[in-house]
Image (cartoon, rainbow, N blue to C red):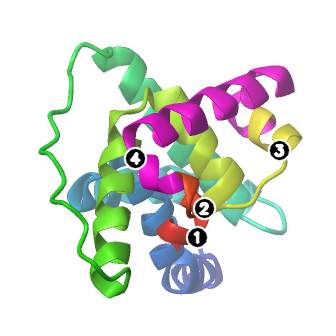
Amino acid sequence: MTQSIEAEFTAFVVARGPALVRVAYALTGDQQTAEDLVQAALAKAFARWSRIENDPEPYVRRIIYNDRVSFWRRRGRGRELLMAELPEAGAHRGHDHDSTLRLALRQALLSLPPRQRAVLVLRYLEDRSVEETAAVLGCRPGTVASQSARALAKLRDLVPELNDATAVEVLR
């Protein structure tokens, strides 16, 4: 590899690395696993860097999504996540309520099946269209729409307070 390719790759990692880790964290729910996922994706991208045209971020994100989905498939969905009961909300709906709602939403996201979680991350956290999400996940747009509807319904069941607030606003 030439020094210019290495410099270009390093600049990309410095500029976009934190955003990639945030997306990976939303997919995994664990900071260390997210960092490992991004590191593996960047290693794969670096090996092909000279062939990646124009905007490399979608290419790297697709590696992240594909690697995570492959991990889920290999591992299966046999585990259940246990959640503690939420404390009763205080009389005021201030910062404490927002923090409680944010934590409850994150726990609920982790309890979703991997495909539904990936759909929500792509659609609402990254603000992608149904067609873009389907392309990234390698499925049909109808699958994205149905998975999204099921996931949002499950989130509303798990965190009833979401009827008062939008899940996307709480996560941001």
> Label 1: how many residues lie within 10 Å, few (<14), some (14-19) or many (20+)?
few
Q: Callout 1, which amino acid?
A: Glu
Question: From the viewer's perspective, is residue 167 above or below residue 120?
Answer: below
Which residue in the protein does label 2 denote?
Answer: 166
117 left or right of 4 in image: left
Q: Upstream in the sequence, badge 4 or badge 1?
A: 4
Report the label total.
4
Where does the image place residue 100, in percent across and percent down from the top left?
28, 67
Q: Secondary structure at mark 4?
A: loop
Q: Callout 3, which amino acid?
A: Glu
Q: Which residues are magenta?
A: 135-162
Does the image show residue 67?
Answer: no
Which residue in the protein does label 1 denote?
Answer: 169
Residue ID at (70%, 49%): 123
Which residue in the protein does label 3 denote?
Answer: 132
Q: Upstream in the sequence, badge 2 or badge 3?
A: 3
Where does the image place residue 140, in percent across and percent down from the top left?
82, 21
